[in-house]
Amino acid sequence: MSESNKMAGRMTSTNRAILIAAFILLAAAIGYAIWRDSVSSATDPATRGTAAPSDQLAELEARTKREPDSAEAWTALGAAKFDLSDFVAAAAAYEKAVALSPDSAGLWSALGEARVMRSDSDPMPAAALKAFDKAIALDAKDPRARYFLAVKKDIGGDHKGAIEDWFALLADTPQGAPWEADLRRTIEQVGQIHKIDVAPRLASTQARPLTANEMPVAARAIPGPSRADMEAASQLPKGQQDQMIE
């Protein structure tokens, strides 16, 4: 029996079902948020939003044949297959992508997620865990890998450790992230199952503010003139200064 199967055996069937349902919801949200931009940029903007899903999938598959050495092409196909719940094909596509781009933490965690989802019995397959460990080694902040490694702690019996890791992820979650509500729900559900009071901390733990790079372009402040700009302007004749103001 594998280590992950032994861990699963320590849980009641009800608790395991609740936990798996919770992390599937969150996994989908995290996966969608992280990879939607990748899929959008990898498809033709002229056909996006007009082609049928089957046509879009056919184009993504055709692209991997035209560009077999493109990690972006395999990533887009993997994300599309994942959206269609074809997790076996999604994992296969992500395996191609990580072979071409082995230093991408996001690709490794996407592969791990697909490997979890394709498993009918093992809640944390060894191959998935290996992918998550690789993602964390490349980027300790990768949200998907952090989430699933906390799941591993929970199904292994370290419920408090899992909740601590989820709270840390919540504190690092940017405001408005689509997985925030599901992450909070997971913490709440696991706390209830194991009689751990999380309500006060959930109320006080807030998602972090967006960084400038994470903000929509329209919401970013317009940069004002630098000191050098102002000094240069002060050397201009008054007429030219007036033109700048106008």
Image (cartoon, rainbow, N blue to C red):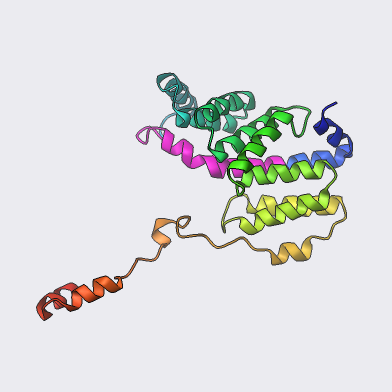
Q: In this view, does 224 lie to the left or right of 186?
A: left
Q: In this view, does 182 lie to the left or right of 49?
A: right
Asked if residue 189 shows in the view, the reply is no
User: What residue is shown at x 84% (from left), y 35% (from top)?
Assistant: 8
Place of residue 202 in the rendered image (x, y in percent of width and height, measured from the top left):
73, 62
User: What residue is shown at x 62% (from left), y 49% (from top)?
Assistant: 179
Q: Quadrant of residue 238?
A: bottom left
**Residue that lies at the very extreme toward the front in this rendered image:** 137
Looking at the picture, tell me which residue is in the foreground, 187 or 52. Answer: 187
Place of residue 153 in the rendered image (x, y in percent of width and height, measured from the top left):
78, 44
| Total numbered labels placed on residues in the image | 0
Q: In which quarter of the image is residue 236?
A: bottom left
Q: Please say whether residue 41 is one of the residues in the magenta stretch.
A: yes
Query: Which residues, given as a range, are shown in magenta?
Result: 23-48
Looking at the picture, tell me which residue is in the foreground, 85 or 136. Answer: 136
Place of residue 183 in the rendered image (x, y in percent of width and height, measured from the top left):
68, 51
Q: In the picture shown, does residue 233 fall above or below 28?
A: below
**Residue that lies at the very extreme toward the bottom in this rendered image:** 238
Q: In the picture shown, does residue 166 fall above or below 19?
A: below
Q: Please say whether residue 72 is one of the residues in the magenta stretch.
A: no
Asked if residue 169 shows in the view, the reply is yes
Place of residue 215 in the rendered image (x, y in percent of width and height, measured from the top left):
46, 58
Q: Quadrant of the N terminus?
A: top right
Q: Quadrant of the C terminus?
A: bottom left
Looking at the picture, tell me which residue is in the foreground, 227 or 174. Answer: 227
User: What residue is shown at x 60% (from left), y 46% (from top)?
Assistant: 142
Majority SS type along the magenta span: helix
Q: In this view, does 73 lie to the left or right of 223?
A: right
